Amino acid sequence: MPTSITSATAIARERAAARAAEPAPPEDIDGSDGPGGSDGPGGPDSLGEIEAGLDRLQDSAATSRPTVGRILLPLGTLAGLLGLWQLAAWFGSPRADLFPGPLDVLGTAASLAADGRLVEAVFTSLQRGVLGFLLALAIGTPLGLLLSASSTLRRGLGPLVSGLQVLPSVAWVPAAIIWFGLTDATVFFVVLMGATPSIVNGFLSGVDTVPPQYRRLGTVLGAGRTQQLLRIVLPAALPGYVAGLKQGWAFSWRSLMAAEIIAVGGSIGFGLGSLLQQGRDLSQMAVVVAAILAILAVGIAVELLVFAPLERSLLRRRGLAPGAGR
């Protein structure tokens, strides 16, 4: 039991014992219910209800969510979709080379994994995506802080940041190839330009949702501008910031695939985008679908293993876990 609940229960019991030791008020002598009576709001029955309510609150907080349904439902949906896909490949398509079924794709993926190409592609793309996202995080977070602290900077640079966010990342690839050649710097530049604006805008959105009473309270308590920003605004803006990080990761992953598909050759390593492009060049539809599924699987894995737990933990600490919808 949490310390605060235990202390509250102990205090309530002591007060009830003290009331029981006192003489009964006149209105209770004839057996009527009063404030200190057995059925009154401060009596033993009410105390028992309070304790039961506290226990229920504790039990509801400690009860784990039904994870079985959360796991079985998506797995069942996935199995159903794969079954429909396989039936369509068997009975709806005369050419397996144009519309391979999941069994053909699974066999191709196994072959790619056996010769090391799939593992190399996943590792290379994941490494680039994570490094590019961390670079964007290191640039986007201080930039978001500056824009949130200065209304002049925000009015000047805010529209540019929003414009960069809606600009397709693939538009940066030709310029990056001219500037950096066929090197990994081209890929990182495209990822950086795709993820940074999303992180900055997510941070600003989180700051905009901070209630103004928080800032006024900080002013009343004597907090300076930097203290308000770091100790009041930034913690309160965390939900919006985390949402911006999720969006930034999605943009970085998409930008990475666009860069790897277009920028092939030179010293650029072999990533999932390169595998996708290789399948297209060789007209191997099973390789193309295997690469698409691998890109999707990595994106879902990062979401489930990194951002979803982070968001749940953040909402749970703020008492908003039931509203997370997970």
Image (cartoon, grey):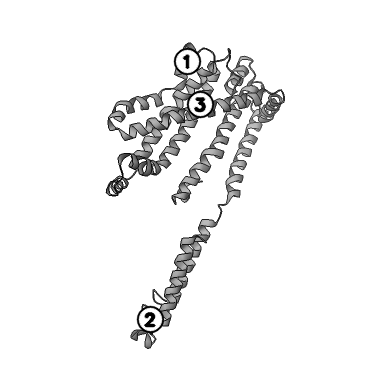
Mark 3 secondary-structure assignment? helix
- The vertical placement of 32 against 58, above or below, is below
Q: Position of residue 159 (x, y in %)?
A: 33, 26
Give the residue type at disc 2.
Asp
Left or right of residue 245, residue 159 in this image: left
Q: Closer to the N terminus: mark 3 or mark 1?
A: 3
Q: Position of residue 216 (x, y in %)?
A: 28, 47
Compare residues 170 and 290 and report the one nearer the observer. Answer: 170
Query: Number of labelled discs?
Result: 3
Give the residue type at disc 1.
Ala
Identity of the residue drawn at 48% across and 17% down: 173
Identity of the residue drawn at 35% across and 84% down: 25
Q: Position of residue 50 (x, y in %)?
A: 45, 68
Number of the front mark, 2 or 1: 1
The residue wearing badge 2 is 33
Compare residues 295 and 284 and report the one nearer the observer. Answer: 295
Determine crowd level at label 3: few under 14, some 14-19, many 20+ residues with C-alpha closer than 10 A.
many
Mark 2 secondary-structure assignment? loop
Mark 1 secondary-structure assignment? helix
Compare residues 144 and 119 and report the one nearer the observer. Answer: 144
**Distance (Cα) linking label 3 and label 2:** 71 Å
Left or right of residue 288, residue 318 in this image: left
The residue wearing badge 1 is 176
Give yes or no for contact between labels 3 and 1 (Cβ–Cβ under 8 Å): no
Number of the front mark, 3 or 2: 3
Write down the quadrant of residue 235 in the picture. Answer: top left
Q: Can residue 217 be seen in this view?
A: yes
Q: Closer to the N terminus: mark 3 or mark 2?
A: 2
Left or right of residue 316, residue 81 in this image: right
Identity of the residue drawn at 56% across and 39% down: 305
The residue wearing badge 3 is 132
**Distance (Cα) linking label 2 and label 1:** 82 Å
